[in-house]
């Protein structure tokens, strides 16, 4: 199989960009994404005409322009011979777009491919957004009518976790605090101001036991990657980042199954990470950076424990002790993660990969983790029912 | 039979009743909490379904559930979808029934919020124009039995 490397990327700061209903003079999705793709192509040192495959993370149902990938290709002047598509599966949509573009290169369908996405959702009111959300994260007839919102499932994880471990839910505040400590130096983060433990722990309860600082805020975002066959990549860039391996797993459930299971265990994360590490002949200790999709504070705790970064019940204490903060011994969500970098869900997978790319090519500025050679990225859907893992490595 | 609780308002979001599962909702209105079990391997499914997810058998039988179980986890949703704002905050949970079935449902907190690990009883929540199901404390005797 051919190898693939990232040779260029661009991302907009996560934040509020979506024009309100009926707005005139706003910048709509395609107009917003176009310069991001041009910037990534320039960063890669290629021409637009070199792109053979283009894979987009599918837009939400609220997007006016349907056939979005075709519209984008026409706008950019692309005439793809490998593939042109938009792909989706809830929270892993961005990761799937990346995965498909990489696969095209590895399979020899394309020498150069792009993976891109834009999400506009911030002008849709929170309550309205949840009308869609409840139908995505659970059965539309047997669970949605009760009001199980996307983050309510993470809250159910949290309540169970604290029941079993007897740990203190107040300590979740340390996840918010350390996320802001990383994002303070991330120019594309949605929130860069520091937050104190007291502030986080006394913020409003949103979905018990999770508070305002335990959950992500609505945000828009746009990202583009340029991926090339490794031999081509080597000629174009000395600081390319290779895709070492990938892994995927689904636990077979849509949020919960109809038989008891440990909700806080996240087996898909563990299996997908093990598959990727196995394929790359690496151990967890060989990884320098971890970008783990975690919409809520508790999710970061649970996924870090699931993949074996910490023992069961230990991640929260490690966070409190500063081990995952800048200067700590575990570089976990150095972007600031979903709580601080921000969480435009269908693009969050792309943003996590973007952070690894920045770090591995030494472009992460003041939050640079020095000497990093390899990073592991996970994105997920549902309640970590499915996980998609990529291991990236510095090629030079 | 399970208890029936009257909720004197219209149902905010009515589940669709498929041609197959209509009997579930019609039974629930009367306090019958019934799902399907597989004739082949014995697996009990929730929600009710024709085919067995375990062995693929198409032969099912009706299986009445006691509605008795333990609260596995719980939350309070304070930021809800628009249609459920009138009921906010929503007390929701996951219940493991004694028959080995897990389900997600509303929680009927009366004197105090139900606690994880507490014994619970599923009750039919009879709205003016529809029905859902929720868990209440197993000790709760304030509701009328189903009929």
Image (cartoon, coloured by chain):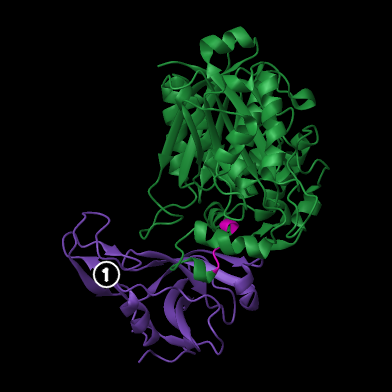
Chain colours: A green, B purple
Question: Could you tell me residue A198's position as x and y percent?
Answer: 80, 52
**Residue A292 in sight in this render:** no
The residue positioned 35% from the left and 59% from the top of the image is A259
Residue sitting nearer the eye, B50 or A287: B50
Residue sitting nearer the eye, A188 or A162: A188
- On screen, A134 above or below A31? below
**Residue B102 in sight in this render:** yes
Question: Which quadrant would the N terminus of chain A be assigned to in this image?
Answer: top left
- On screen, A262 above or below B30? above
The residue positioned 70% from the left and 52% from the top of the image is A218
Question: Could you tell me residue A323's position as x and y percent?
Answer: 68, 33
Residue sitting nearer the eye, A194 or A114: A114
Most common SS among magenta residues: loop
Q: Dot 1: few (<14), some (14–19), or many (≥20) neighbours within 10 Å?
A: many
The residue positioned 19% from the left and 62% from the top of the image is B58
Q: Which residues are magenta?
A: A147-151
Residue sitting nearer the eye, A13 or B68: A13
């Amino acid at each position: 199989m051919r190898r693939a490397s990232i040779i260029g990327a661009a991302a907009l700061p996560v934040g509020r960009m979506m024009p309100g209903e009926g707005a005139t003079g706003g910048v709509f999705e395609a107009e917003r994404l176009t310069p991001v793709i041009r910037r990534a192509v320039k960063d890669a040192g290629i021409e637009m005409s070199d792109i053979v495959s283009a894979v987009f993370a599918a837009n939400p149902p609220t997007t006016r322009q349907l056939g979005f990938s075709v519209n984008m290709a026409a706008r950019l002047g692309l005439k793809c011979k490998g593939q042109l598509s938009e792909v989706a599966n809830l929270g892993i949509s961005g990761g799937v777009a990346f995965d498909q573009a990489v696969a095209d290169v590895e399979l020899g369908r394309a020498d150069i491919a792009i993976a891109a996405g834009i999400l506009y959702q911030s002008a849709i009111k929170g309550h309205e957004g949840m009308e869609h959300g409840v139908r995505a994260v659970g059965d539309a007839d047997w669970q949605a009518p009760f009001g199980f919102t996307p983050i309510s499932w993470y809250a159910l994880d949290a309540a169970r976790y604290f029941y079993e471990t007897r740990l203190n839910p107040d300590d979740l505040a340390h996840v918010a605090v350390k996320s802001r400590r990383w994002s303070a130096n991330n120019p594309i983060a949605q929130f860069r101001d520091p937050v104190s433990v007291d502030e986080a722990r006394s913020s409003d309860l949103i979905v018990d036991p999770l508070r305002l600082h335990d959950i992500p805020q609505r945000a828009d975002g746009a990202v583009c990657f340029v991926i090339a066959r490794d031999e081509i990549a080597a000629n174009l860039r000395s600081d390319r980042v290779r895709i070492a391996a990938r892994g995927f797993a689904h636990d077979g459930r849509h949020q919960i199954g109809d038989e008891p299971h440990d909700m806080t265990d996240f087996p898909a994360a563990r299996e997908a990470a093990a598959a990727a590490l196995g394929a790359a002949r690496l151990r967890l200790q060989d990884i320098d950076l971890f970008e783990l999709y975690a919409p809520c504070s508790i999710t970061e705790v649970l996924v870090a424990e699931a993949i074996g970064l910490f023992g069961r019940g230990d991640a929260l204490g490690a966070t409190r002790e500063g081990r995952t903060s800048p200067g700590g011994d575990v570089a976990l969500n150095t972007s600031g993660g979903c709580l601080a970098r921000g969480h435009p869900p269908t693009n969050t997978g792309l943003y996590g990969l973007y952070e690894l790319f920045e770090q591995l090519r030494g472009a992460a500025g003041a939050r640079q983790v020095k000497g990093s050679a390899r990073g592991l990225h996970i994105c997920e859907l549902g309640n970590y029912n499915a996980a998609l893992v990529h291991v990236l490595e510095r090629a030079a | 039979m399970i208890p029936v609780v009257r909720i004197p308002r219209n149902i905010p979001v009515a589940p669709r009743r498929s041609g197959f599962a209509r009997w579930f909702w019609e039974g629930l209105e009367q306090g019958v909490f019934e799902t399907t079990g597989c004739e082949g391997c014995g697996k009990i499914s929730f929600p009710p379904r024709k085919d067995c997810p375990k062995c693929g058998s198409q032969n099912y039988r009706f299986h009445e559930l006691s509605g008795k179980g333990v609260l596995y986890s719980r939350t309070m949703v304070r930021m809800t979808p628009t249609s459920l704002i009138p009921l906010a905050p929503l007390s929701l949970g996951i219940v493991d029934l004694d028959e080995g079935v897990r389900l997600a449902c509303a929680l009927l907190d009366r004197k105090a919020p139900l606690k994880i690990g507490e014994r619970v009883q599923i009750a039919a929540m009879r709205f003016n124009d529809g029905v859902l199901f929720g868990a209440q404390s197993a000790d709760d005797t304030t509701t009328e039995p189903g009929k």
